[in-house]
Amino acid sequence: MSGVDVREAITRAHQEEWARVVTALTRRFGDLDIAEEAAAEAFATAVERWTADGVPPNPSGWLTTTANRKAIDRIRRENKRDDKHQEARMVYDDDLPEPVGAIDDDRRRLIFTCCHPALATQTRVALTLRMVGGLTVPEIARAFLVAESAIGQRITARRPRSRRRASPNGCPPPRISCGASPGCSPA
């Protein structure tokens, strides 16, 4: 087949099959952009292949199959690209995670409440280990080398008093300074 005949066959196929190929791809993939680009790539491939190999027996089927494969290839490339970008961000991410403000502020407030100056030193340490550190009463008792009941009493008996004495921001009352917040003056 001559170059003129191939050109005429491609022009005729474009006029007769373009809408059918795009419609079939849109129905299958649900994306008009992908369908149009795949159809355009299929026709560009037809120009190259049909010139070298001749016009296939079923140009409509050839175009639809080629466009379908082009669309699948594009979708796969995009999926791989997104995965690779995500992977690269994870590997080469130099940004440190930003601290979560509310948790840090709440934790600081809890530490100051547990370490209130009105509490005995051993009670402060035991209460802080329990509330902030998450240790159990038996673990704290072993660390202090005392009975579990003694530590349990220190922790539970002091909680209500420490709540009454702590200011709303978790710092000691103004007469006792901790320097932790603008409301507290340095010691």
Image: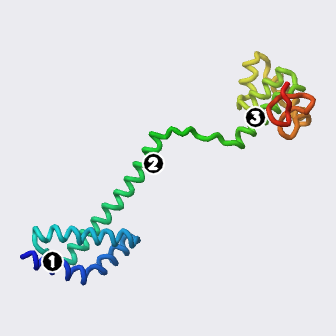
Q: CA distance from mark 3 to mark 1?
A: 77 Å
Mark positioned earlier in the residue sequence (1 or 2): 1
- Mark 1 sits on what residue? 7
What residue do we see at 10% from left, 67% from top? Answer: 52
Which badge, 3 or 1, is on the more N-terminal residue? 1
**On the rendered image, what quadrant is the C terminus found in?**
top right
Indicate the quadrant containing the N terminus: top left, top right, bottom left or bottom right: bottom left
For label 2, the residue is 86
C-beta proximity under 8 Å, tags 2 and 3: no
Residue at the top extreme, as displayed: 145
| Front-lying residue, 166 or 81 | 81
In the rendering, at what x and y percent does residue 182 appear? 82, 36
Q: Which residue matches tag 3?
A: 108
SS at mark 2 in the image: helix
Compute the Cα span from label 2 to label 3. 34 Å
Q: CA distance from mark 1 to mark 2?
A: 44 Å
Above or below: residue 153 compared with residue 21:
above
Disc 1 residue type (three-letter): Arg
Looking at marks 2 and 3 on the same chain, the residue that comes earlier in the sequence is marked by 2
Is 160 placed left or right of 93 in the picture? right
